Amino acid sequence: MQETTVCTAVWYCPVPRFFMAKTAVARLARKTKYELTPCAICGSREAVAVANRADLQREMERVWTFHNARFRHPVPPKYLTDRVVFSQLPAWRLVRCASCTHLYRSPRETPETVKRTYSEDALSESVYESAYARQSFFYRAQVERLLAFAGRVQHGLEVGSYTGGFLAAALEAGLSFTGIDVNPGATAFGARHGLPIATCSLEELNPSQMYDAIVIWNTFEQLSDVKSACLVANRLLRKGGVLAVRVPNSAFYTRWRHHLNDVWAPWAERMLVHNNLLGFPYREGFTARSLSRLLKDSGFTIGRVQGDTLVRVSDGWTKRAAVLDEWVTKELQRLTQRGWEAPWVEVYATTS
C-alpha cells in the first residue's frame, strides 16, 4: 500500500547568495508529491538507513563550498545547473535494500512529479550549447565501446538524449541513431543542430518499432520506473539486441562518504564532488548485485562492465587550477578504479 503526501522542501544554503538564485529557489520550493515504495529492483521493504535529511544537507553544503572556491565570480546562476542546482530536490532520506543492496530514496517522488520536473526544466541556449559541446566530445568513448561490443548498429535508440551530445558523436561515426527526451526545450535545441530527437518517453514509443541497440546514458537512474524501462527496452530490441546503461555506483558513494571526516576527507570529497555523487542527487543508486538482478529479471545477459568517471563539468567559469584539479582527479580514477570500483559504471547487455 502506497502512502502519498505533499510537502514543500526548502533547504538552507549558508554560502554565498548566488547559490540561492531565483532558479534554485523555485526548484527547491516547488511542491512535490512523495510516496513510500518498496525497492524498485526486488520489491523488498526491508531497508537500512544510509543518510537522513540532515546528513544530506551537510553533504550538499560541502558541495556548495567546494564549487564556491573554484568558480570565477560572479558566476551567472544559469551555469550552476548539475553542479550545485539539480532538477530534483535533494532526497529526504537514502536507504539501502537489505536484500539486493540497491540504494534509493525513501520516500521518493511520484512518477507524475518526475515527468513534470524533467519536462518543465527549461535552460538557456548558452547553457545548452555548453553542455552540448562537452558531451558530444565525451560520448565518442561510448560510441567506441558500443561498436566494440555490438559491432555495427543499423538502427539504434538513445533514451534521455538531452541536447543530443551522443547522437552527434554517433552520427560522426556513421551510426544511425534516433533519440527521445521528455524535455521539449532540450529536444528543440537538438533539432536545431539537425539531430533526430523526439519529445516523448520510452513507454510512449510505437511498440512495433524494433532496434538493434538502446542506450541510456546518465538518465537511467532518474527514470520513474527502471524495471518497466528494462522490460519495454527488451520488447523493442531485436533478438540479440543490446541495452547499454550508464549509472552511478552507489557502493562507491557509500564507501567514500564514510571517509569524509577522517584523514582521507580531502580525497574523498574531491572524488565524490567531481563525479556529482556527494549528496547523491539521483533517484536510484546501483550496485553490481542490484543491476545484475534487474537486467536478469528483465531478460538480459550482461556482456561487459566498464568503469568510468562523470563527464567533465568545468567550463569557462571555472578557475584554471580547478580545471586541472578535476582533470587530474578523474585521470587517476580511470587508471586505478576499474569496473564496479569506479564512480560511474556502464553495463552492456544483450537480450536473452
Image: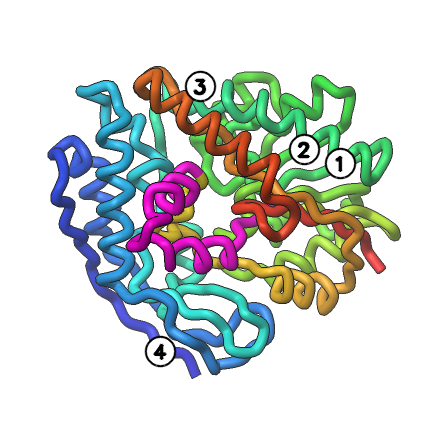
Circle on res. 129: 3
Disc 1 and disc 3: Cα gap in Å? 25 Å
Q: Residue type at mark 2?
A: Gln
Residue ID at (69%, 57%) = 232
Is residue 201 in sight in this rendering?
no
Residue marked by disc 4: 3
The overriding secondary structure of the stretch rendered in magenta is helix
Looking at the picture, does residue 316 appear above or below residue 50? above
First-in-chain label (3 vs 4): 4
On screen, residue 73 versus residue 148, left or right, reads left
How busy is the neighbourhood of tag 1: few (under 14 within 10 Å), some, or many (20 plus)? many
In space, the residues marked 1 and 4 are separated at their CA atoms by: 41 Å
Circles 2 and 1: CB atoms closer than 8 Å? yes
Q: Residue at label 1? A: 146
Q: Which of marks 3 and 2 is in front?
A: 2
The residue depicted at 29 percent of the width and 66 percent of the height is: 52
8 within the magenta span: no
Q: Which of 264 and 187 is in front in this view?
A: 264
Q: Which amino acid does label 3 sit on?
A: Glu
Residue 194: image location, x then y, percent: 60, 18
Question: Magenta segment, which residues?
Answer: 246-274
Q: Distance between the residues labelled 2 and 1?
A: 6 Å
Horizontal side of 146 relative to 290 (left or right) equals right
